[in-house]
Every structure is written in structure tokens, then in C-alpha cells.
Image (spheres, grey):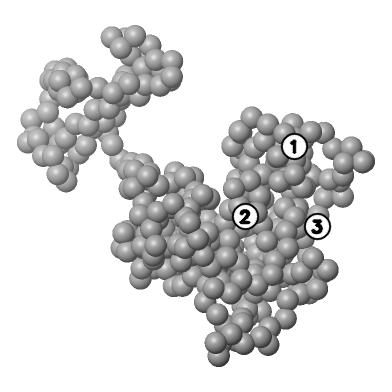
Amino acid sequence: MTCSFKFTVDGFGRSLSQEEKISVIESFSFMAFEGPIKMKNPDAEFFVCEEYGEPDNPLPKETPKMIWFGRLLGQGSRDLIDKFDVKKRKYLGNTTMDAELSLVMANQALARNGALVYDPFVGTGSFLLTCSHFGAYSMGSDIDGRQIRGTAGFRRGVDGISANLAQYGLADRVLDTVVFDICRNPWRDGPMFDAIVTDPPYGVRAGAKRLGRKNGTLPELSLKVVDGVENHRRSDYLPPTVPYEMSDVIGDLLGFAAEKLVVGGRLVYWLPTVAGEYDPKDLPVHPVLRVVANSEQPFGGWSRRLVTMEKIAPLQGDASAELPEHAPAHRNFRDRYFSKFEAITPETE
């Protein structure tokens, strides 16, 4: 072979020293590589991987289980996990999503150049970063503007989401972050988003809330004036809210996605469940949404499931999400979590 080339050597199950990598490369000297070595943009790149078993149960380091060799045609972007590592992020909250999972969700949503992605429970904006990195325009909303602004005791940063956008150079990709209750949103009727990517709050680290009063009425605009400013226009004003039960959150989320997604658009969300009680029938369904993927991340007594759905047809009439007839494993999840997942009886339900 007379073209320029390069060798890349790596290990699975343990790290290889630079001396070991050089030794591996030299072991291929019997092959007819006559072209020049070129470390940047070579005509051909070859990859050698020595497999030493699982990282937590490796084989003796002298004995690779398998040696893989081939021409490198393409590679993933695992370096992005380090780039978006939350430990390096200027602004964090107690619900900030792990970088790798945020990237997985952006891929599940098919985030791409020109797509419009929305997070209705934006929190500290993890999904805005990863979706925008892949070229999408993104935006988010939350009922609690303090998370967006970075106030009220969040761990780091006073500039909120905007600090992270500046850190990663993505300010021109994030259209806006706004504050409202998703149940009473201001969006125009009809489809507009290519993807909805979100982690609905389920009450473990942050409880789900919606506008309302304990007596069941909705809050009206207050006529009270303080220092010449109407009460509801004060920067520190917080409207009254009531708990938002998890099964209601998911049902409303599907209904919102069915209306606001374009055909072919995707909804990607996390669903918490009691591990031993989950049944595939727990998932709410909708006539215009089909399940693309449903995978589990276990945590012992509970799990959360990453659910991806695709809109397959235009929404006709007032079709709504079809909720499970039985009590799903995510109903009253917050109470179940803090009661250590005691079994539900007619009396406790």
C-alpha cells in the first residue's frame, strides 16, 4: 500500500500505555505499508482494539480476549460526553440531566440542522444544549422561572441557562426560554415542533406543579398594586400552584405532542415506574403516536423508562390520549417513592 496511512490503537477493559500502543503498531510491520505515515487526514486509517473483558471484571492484562483489526470508516462522538459533562458546566440544578443521557435523547429525537425542538419542562436546559449541538433550533419553557434564571439557591451560577449557552457557544441556536404552565400554554393551534424532548418532574427532587388553587379554581390576575406595580407583574411574583400527578402529566404530554408535533416528529420523555409493578400496558397511547423505543434504566426499587414516540398522522378532531384503565406503575409515584414502594391496597389508593 503506497497511500498515506495512520494506526489508532485502543483497549476495551483497560487502558493501554503509549509504549504498548507503539508495540502493537510495530507488530504489523510484516504488512506491506510503503506509504507515508500521516497523523492528520490520512488516505487510510486502521484501527486496532484489544479486548480485555468487561471493565469491572477484566482478564489478566497480558491476555487480551480478542484483537480486532480493520480499516476505520467512521466513528462515534463519545468525546461529546466529556464536552457536556455536568461537572464542567457553569450552571447546574438538582434536576440537571446526565450528559450521556441528554445526548442519547437528542439522537432519539433526530435533532438535526433546521429542526425545531421544544422542552416543556426545561429546568436547567440540558436538552437545549445537546439538541442545539446537533444543529437544531431549540426552545424551552417551565412553570418555575427561577430555574431558567438561575436564582433561588441553585448550586452554581447566577446567570442560569444563558451562562451555559455562552459556555458552549450555542446562544444563536436557542431561540428563547419562557415561563408558563404547559397546561395553559400560549402556543398557536396546530403542529409546529419537529421534536419534543423532556424529563417531566416526578416529585423526587422536584415536584410537578400546575396553576391552580386548593379549592380547584384557577388563579386570576390579581388587582392588588404594590408600589405602583400590579401584583402579577412583579419580578418576584409566584402564582399559586397545586401538585400535578404523574399519570396526569404523562397523559397531558401525549395530548400536547399529538397536536404540536409535525407528522414524523418525535416525542422523547422519561417515565418513572415502580420496578416490580411495571407493565407495558402502563404506557398511555394516542391514535396518532406510535412507540418507537422503550428502554429501562433501573435504580433498584424503581426504574425510569426512556420512551420515544413518533407522530404518524395528522390529528383529527379532539382525539386525546388513551390512559390505562388500571392503576399504572407511575401513578402517585412521588408518594410511592417516599413510602419505599409499599404495595397499593384499596385503602391506601
Quadrant position of residue 39: top left
Label 2 sits on a secondary structure element that is loop
Tell me the amino acid under the disc marked 3: Glu
Q: Which mark is residue 339?
A: 1
Q: What x and y, as percent, mark residue 3?
A: 12, 39
Query: Dot 2 surroundings within 10 Å: few (below 14), some, or many (20 or more)?
Result: many
Q: Nearer the viewer, residue 137 or 147?
A: 147
- Identified at 51% across, 49% down, the residue is 94
- Identified at 87% across, 50% down, the residue is 325
Q: CA distance from mark 1 to mark 3?
A: 28 Å
Quadrant position of residue 16: top left
User: Horizontal placement of 325 versus 186: left or right?
Assistant: right
Q: CA distance from mark 2 to mark 3?
A: 19 Å
Residue projecting furthest to the front: 227
Where is 211 relative to 42, above or below?
Answer: below
Quadrant position of residue 68: top left
Where is 33 relative to 148, above or below?
Answer: above
Residue matched to label 3: 322
- Identified at 19% across, 19% down, the residue is 20
Residue matched to label 2: 200
Q: Say which of marks 1 and 2 sits in front.
A: 1
The mark that comes first in sequence, 1 or 3, is: 3
Tell me the amino acid under the disc marked 1: Ser
Q: Say which of marks 2 and 3 sits in front.
A: 2
Query: Dot 1 surroundings within 10 Å: few (below 14), some, or many (20 or more)?
Result: few
- Quarter of the image that includes the N terminus: top left
